[in-house]
């Protein structure tokens, strides 16, 4: 009997003893500033099933200097797992999505409507929809950024 996700390697997906895992993301290509971005959309077959994505297997994209991200979408949200370099920045901008910054390592200076706050490991910065904001990396580090609803980046 086939077992979802229990395949010895990708070339054996067609074998009768296994089926593709529901956590296998599908690529979505777009262009940003002349750079091809490949983002991944989680496949889900029903609301009752869980989708799992190994983010370490996603391609790394450097959309801005010093911001290396792995991107994917769930049904309603966009996720970016960033590694950032000290001194790198994301310019002031706004968008219709709520955005949540979860700092895992290092420190970020997050500015909203002209007010800057420093966020370190374990801190979360929540940017409401349509709010001017920018980010400057105060050190090297890692963060997860989530946008809701889905954010088209291309």
Image (cartoon, rainbow, N blue to C red):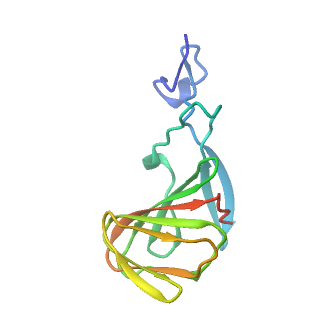
Q: In the image shown, does 32 or 3 lie closer to the viewer?
A: 3
Residue drawn 59% across the image and 13% down it: 16
Question: Where's residue 140, x and y in %?
Answer: 32, 72
Name, please, the residue furthest toward the top.
1
Q: Residue at x 46, y 48 (%)?
A: 55
Q: Residue furthest bottom?
A: 114
- Residue drawn at point x = 65 percent, y = 73 percent: 95
> Which residue: 64% across, 58% down?
149
Q: Position of residue 17 (x, y in %)?
A: 54, 14
Q: Nearer the viewer, residue 96 or 61?
A: 96
Image quadrant in which the N terminus is located: top right
Q: Position of residue 70 (x, y in %)?
A: 50, 57
> Up-down: is 116 above or below 142?
below
The part of the image, by quadrant, that contains residue 47 is: top right
Q: Is residue 141 above or below residue 20?
A: below
With respect to residue 69, does 23 lie above or below?
A: above
């Amino acid at each position: 009997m086939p077992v979802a996700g229990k395949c010895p390697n990708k070339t054996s997906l067609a074998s009768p003893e296994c089926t593709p895992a529901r956590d296998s993301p599908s690529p979505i290509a777009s262009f940003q500033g002349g750079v091809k971005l490949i983002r991944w959309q989680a496949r889900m077959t029903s609301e009752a099933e869980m989708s799992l994505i190994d983010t370490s297997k996603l391609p790394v994209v450097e959309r801005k200097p010093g911001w290396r991200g792995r991107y994917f979408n769930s049904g309603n949200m966009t996720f970016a797992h960033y590694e950032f370099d000290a001194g790198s920045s994301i310019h002031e901008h706004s968008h219709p999505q709520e955005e949540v910054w979860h700092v895992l390592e290092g420190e970020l200076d997050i500015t909203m409507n002209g007010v800057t706050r420093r966020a370190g490991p374990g801190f979360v910065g929540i940017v409401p929809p349509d709010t001017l904001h920018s980010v400057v990396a105060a050190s090297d580090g890692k963060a997860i950024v989530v946008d809701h609803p889905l954010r088209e980046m291309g």
